[in-house]
Image (cartoon, rainbow, N blue to C red):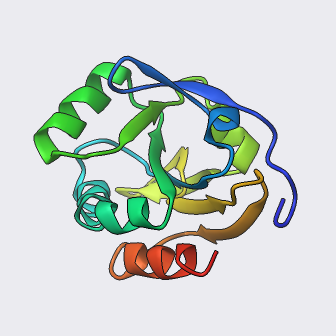
């Protein structure tokens, strides 16, 4: 999918909104997929995006976090952490499937199907420019921001 136009998608998001990729034309879109609201790694990752959010905005970028959690769970997570960006609910895994982030993984010794922590940067023309898969949280958001600033 790299260097190709991302197919249009839309999904329900926090704040009573709906995220439509087509509505973001002209902006850089940073989409980060994460396994679950209010878990340690996902909380830290969201906080890192929160803390650097002003710099993403200054670089003409929109940040969207996506997981399979419900909008109610997302609203609680967003409020508790003070996230200035929306969280999209992909309960039917349509967007997760589009980006190929659903994986078999081991959790507490059991095989489970879940989201592989991944981040994607889509340019103002809707073209996928960069992807990170199997993300480790420390330093990741800074790396994404540095890349976004080059666009």
Q: Nearer the viewer, residue 57 or 79?
A: 57
* Relative vertical location of residue 147 with respect to residue 112 in this rendering, above or below: below
Viewer-side residue, 37 vs 110: 37
Residue 20's x, y, as percent?
62, 30
Residue 95 percent coordinates (x, y): 66, 36
Q: Residue at x 34, y 56 (%)?
A: 108
Image: 52 above or below 149:
above
Q: Position of residue 41 (x, y in %)?
A: 29, 62
Quarter of the rendering containing residue 45: bottom left
- The residue sitting at 64% across, 33% down in the picture is 23
**Quick one: 76 or 52, which is closer to the camera?**
52
Name the residue at 79% across, 47% down.
6
Seen at 85% across and 66% down, the residue is 3
In the displayed image of the protein, which residue is found farthest to the right?
A: 4
Q: How many marks?
A: 0
* Quarter placement of the N terminus: bottom right
Left or right: residue 15 compared with residue 8: left
Q: Position of residue 79 (x, y in %)?
A: 16, 35
> In the rendered view of the protein, which quadrant contains the C terminus?
bottom right
């Amino acid at each position: 999918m790299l260097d190709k136009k991302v197919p249009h998608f839309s999904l329900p998001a926090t704040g009573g909104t709906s995220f439509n990729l087509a509505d973001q034309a002209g902006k850089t879109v940073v989409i980060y997929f994460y396994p679950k609201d209010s878990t340690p790694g996902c909380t830290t990752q969201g906080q890192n995006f929160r803390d650097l959010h002003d710099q993403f905005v200054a670089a003409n970028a929109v940040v969207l976090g996506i997981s399979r959690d419900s909008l109610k769970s997302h609203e609680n997570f967003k409020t508790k952490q003070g996230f200035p960006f929306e969280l999209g609910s992909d309960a039917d895994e349509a967007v997760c499937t589009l980006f190929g982030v659903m994986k078999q993984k081991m959790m507490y010794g059991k095989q489970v199907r879940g989201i592989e922590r991944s981040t994607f940067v889509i340019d103002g023309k809707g073209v996928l420019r960069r992807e990170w898969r199997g993300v480790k949280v420390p330093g990741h958001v800074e790396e994404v921001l540095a890349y976004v600033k080059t666009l």
